[in-house]
Image (cartoon, rainbow, N blue to C red):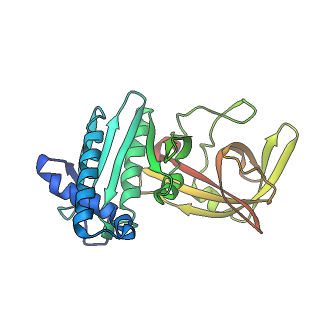
Amino acid sequence: MRKNDSDAITLRQAEPNDEAFLYRLYASVRAEEMAAWGWDSAQQEAFLGLQFRGQQAHYREYPNTDHQIILADGRPIGRILVSDLKDEFRLVDIALLSEYRNAGIGAALIGELLRRAAQAGKAVRLHVEKTNGAQRLYQRLGFRHVSDTGSHYLMEWLDCEVATKKNRSGESLPMLDTLHYEDFASHINSRFRAQLSADSTMEMTLINVEDKSPSPRQEQFVLTFLAPREAPPLQGLYQLQHEQLGGGAVFLVPIARDENGLTYEAVFNRNRAATQ
């Protein structure tokens, strides 16, 4: 987890004297929004102070929280707050100062949380604003939308090794758990057949395989498929068949439709040792 070669990323428990930094972090997260409103500095300070105190009070309502400060070479650059609940880890908040965003730090930290959840047999859930671009990251890590609260989505991650899912016909199917990045990477531009119903199938082409593994112990990769334009824009578990790779169930999420067809993504995220 590095911003660059000189910035070692570590964690420590949050302390009461972190309050000033947490306020600066909160203001950084909302800086672009504040600038668009055209308020003067006094108005911004008053609003941000009120909102920050409200956020802190809300976060204190979560039980069994692990609140850690993210450090780069010992300097605070962000925070991650996780609530350990009966059947889930709730990712209450993860935030970084602006100069440390889009550097893979957040993805690596969430990846570690997913590893812990897989070992504990728990889900990971979070709320994200509908306008927050972080949704794309969460989807790449394997989160899916499970409910809509109006201003936010509830998103959920379930480990493919322990989660029991069903296809749209109601038949229980195991997730594909025997193939790895290398297996798929050697079959880019090859065709898969997806079962849509008992008497309906569609062909799709594997157009990209991207390795996102954050560590040697954790395997993450993303498959991108191109299907015909008329393919169903529905996320769910599809039974796929390939001439060389065989068959298996893969959870597909539609991400875009253009003149070339409908694109789906499948995200694999699991403990590497458990699949070998």
Tell me if residue 85 comes above or below residue 203 in the rendering. Answer: above
Residue 190 visible to an observer of this rendering: yes
Q: Residue at x 46, y 57 (%)?
A: 134
Count of marks overlaid on the render:
0
User: Which quadrant would residue 183 be assigned to in this image?
Assistant: bottom right
Residue lying at the far right in this picture: please name it.
199
Percent position (x, y) of residue 20? 16, 56
Q: Is residue 196 left or right of residue 207?
A: right
Task: Name the one closer to the observer, 115 or 37.
Answer: 37
Q: Residue at x 20, y 50 (%)?
A: 12
Residue 10 visible to an observer of this rendering: no
Tell me if residue 205 comes above or below residue 120 in the rendering. Answer: below
Residue lying at the far left in this picture: please name it.
17
User: Which quadrant would residue 9 be assigned to in this image?
Assistant: bottom left
Tell me if residue 20 comes above or below residue 145 in the rendering. Answer: below
> Quadrant where the N terminus lies?
bottom left
Percent position (x, y) of residue 113? 38, 45
Percent position (x, y) of residue 65? 28, 37
Task: Name the one closer to the observer, 275 or 173.
Answer: 173
User: Which quadrant would residue 88 be assigned to in this image?
Assistant: top left
Percent position (x, y) of residue 97? 29, 64
Q: Is residue 220 left or right of residue 1?
A: right
Q: Residue at x 34, y 48 (%)?
A: 93
Tell me if residue 228 comes above or below residue 234 in the rendering. Answer: below
Q: Residue at x 17, y 62 (%)?
A: 74
Task: Name the one closer to the observer, 229 or 181.
Answer: 229
